[in-house]
Amino acid sequence: MAKPIDIASEYFSTKAAATARCQDILRAYPGQPRSGAGQPQEVTDPTHVAFLTALVERHPKADDKIGSGVAGFKVQVNPDGTGNTRCFWVIHHDGTATHFSFKSCL
């Protein structure tokens, strides 16, 4: 039996549905041309920010990922990945950033 997942104010009846939502958000930020290595793009939609805030709080290493606090999010190519794999990054209040896998949060 599928285990439902609540993230922020959104309800998903399956993990696959939550995964699809995360992928939709990733695709909404394809990267800014000429923005530097990894083509970072800030997450600007308030609904996306609220969702990602609740999502990263579910990470098994949430304290490490959240660090000095969440100032925002960006989508950028993961330097540890292969090819052009884009992932979510937490931007901390101290100006540093840490990437996280949404799959680890689900």
Image: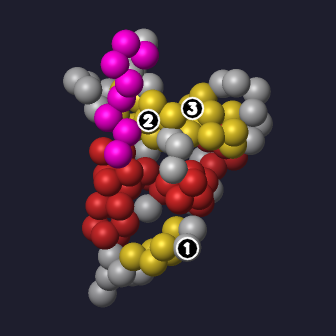
Check disc 3 and report its element: helix, strand or loop.
strand
Residue 101 drawn at (x, y percent): 43, 44
Disc 3 crowd rating (10 Å Cα; few below 14, some 14-19, many 20+) is: some
Residue at far bottom of view? 1
Q: Residues within 10 Å of mark 2 (few under 14, many from 20)?
A: many
Is residue 42 depicted above or below 25 in this figure?
above
Q: Is residue 50 magenta?
A: no
Q: Is residue 6 visible?
A: yes
Kind of residue sitting beneath label 3: Thr
Q: Residue at x 44, y 25 (%)?
A: 40
The stretch of residues the image draws in magenta is: 28-35
Horizontal and vertical percent for residue 1? Answer: 30, 87
Examine the residues drawn in magenta and state their main secondary structure. Answer: loop
How many marks overall? 3
The residue that disc 1 covers is: 9
**Residue 4 at x, y percent in the picture:** 41, 80
- Would you name the residue on which mark 2 appears? 75
Identified at 48% across, 73% down, the residue is: 10
Q: Dot 1: few (<14), some (14–19), or many (≥20) neighbours within 10 Å?
A: few
For the residues labelled 2 and 3, say whether their Cβ atoms are less than 8 Å apart: no
Q: Which residue is mark 3?
A: 98
Q: Quadrant of residue 16?
A: bottom left
**Distance (Cα) linking label 2 and label 3:** 11 Å
The residues bearing labels 1 and 3 have C-alpha atoms spaced at a distance of 24 Å
Provide the secondary structure element on which disc 1 rests: loop
Q: Eyeballing the image, is 18 above or below 100?
A: below
Mark 1 belongs to which amino acid?
Answer: Ser
- As measured in the structure, the alpha-carbon distance from the residue carrying label 1 to the one carrying label 2 is 21 Å
